[in-house]
Image: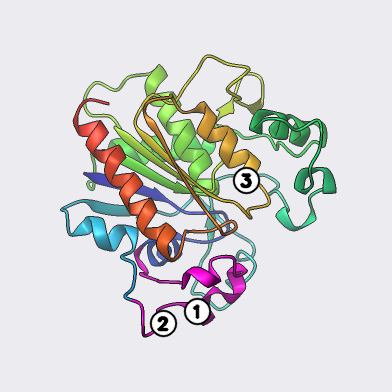
Amino acid sequence: MKFLCLHGTDTNAEFLQMQLCTPTTIPPTHLTTPPHEISKHTNPPSLPPTAALTHELTQEKHTFHYLNGPLTSPTPYPGLESFPGPFHRYYDRQQLDMSNLPSSFTHPNSDIKTPADWMRLLRSHNLDHDRTTSALDFVLKHMESSPEGPYDGIIGFSEGALVAADVILHQQRHPPPATRLRVAIFISGAPAWDYDLHRSLLADETKQRIRVPSVSVIGKEDPIAGAARALYELCEEGKRGLVEWEGGHGIPRGEAQGRMVQGVRRAINRARMGG
C-alpha cells in the first residue's frame, strides 16, 4: 500500500519522517518517563530496538510519502528550534495551547463522562477553533495531481490527523471515480470538522462515521487525549483499532511502537479483505 503522511503543526515532512522511521526501545520500568526524558533511555544495550512503523512496513513493500502543509509557520513547534526548517502548518488558525488548558480539562470532572463531553467543554471555552476548507482542498488537490499517487492509505499526526479525518469523510460523501483511500491511521488526533455548523463532529451528535479500517493511537498522558478519543469514537465499530500508550502528545516509543505496527498491519489486512 501507498500511504500519504501528514505532519503536525509547525513542524515539517522531514520531521514526521524521522518520527515514524526511528526505532527505539524503552525499558518497561521507564514507560512512564516524561517525553523530554525519553532520549536518555532509548536503545539500551541489553534490549533490541523495536522496529519503527515505516522501517517495518517498508520491508513489506508499503511506501510512505510526506506532504508539507501549505502554510509557512512563523515559528517552529516548541523544542524544534534546532531542527532544519522551514516549518509548516495546514491551518491558518489559532493553535490549542496544550500547556495552558483550564484545570477542568486535566482533572476528574463530573461533567466529563465521554470524549464527546470533553470536546463540548472545549467548545464552551471557545477552544474548538474554527477551520476553513483550505487544508482539505490542498490535500485533495495533491492527491488528484501528485505523480506519487494514487494513495491507498493516509497517516496523520496531531494537526495532520485532523486533516486526514476530514479527507476520509469528504471522500465518503463524494466518491472519486477511480481509487480511494482504504485505511486511516490517526496519531494524537482530534475529530473531523463540520463545515456547515463550524464545530467538531462528535459521535453522539452525528450519524456520520469514518467507515474505512482505522487505527487511533493515543497517549494516556496527552493533555488533549479527550480529542483523540473523540476521533476514535467517530470511527466505525468493527473497523477501528485502538493503541494506547504511556506517553503524551507524540509518536509511541518502546513496546508501544511495536503495538502500533501490529495495529496498522491489522487495519491493512482488513482493508485488503474489503473492510
Which label belongs to residue 225? 3
Q: Position of residue 143 (x, y in %)?
A: 32, 38
Q: Which residue is mark 2?
A: 44
Q: Is residue 146 visible?
A: no
Per the image, is 32 magenta? yes
For the point 29% across and 23% down, which residue is it? 176
* Badge 2 density bin: few <14, some 14–19, many ≥20, Cα 10 Å: few
Q: Nearer the viewer, mark 2 or mark 3?
A: 2
Residue 148 among magenta residues: no
Please state, as top left, top right, bottom left or bottom right, where the C terminus lies in the image: top left
Most foreground residue, 29 or 222: 29
Q: Earlier in the sequence, mark 3 or mark 1?
A: 1
For badge 1, the amino acid type reads: His
**Which span of residues is magenta-colored?**
21-47
Q: Amino acid at mark 3?
A: Ala
Query: Counting other residues with Cα less than 10 Å from the Cα at mark 3, is it few (<14), some (14-19), or many (20 or more)?
Result: many
Q: Which residue is mark 1?
A: 41
Q: Tell me, yes or no, whether the two marked residues, 1 and 2, touch with CB atoms within 8 Å.
A: yes
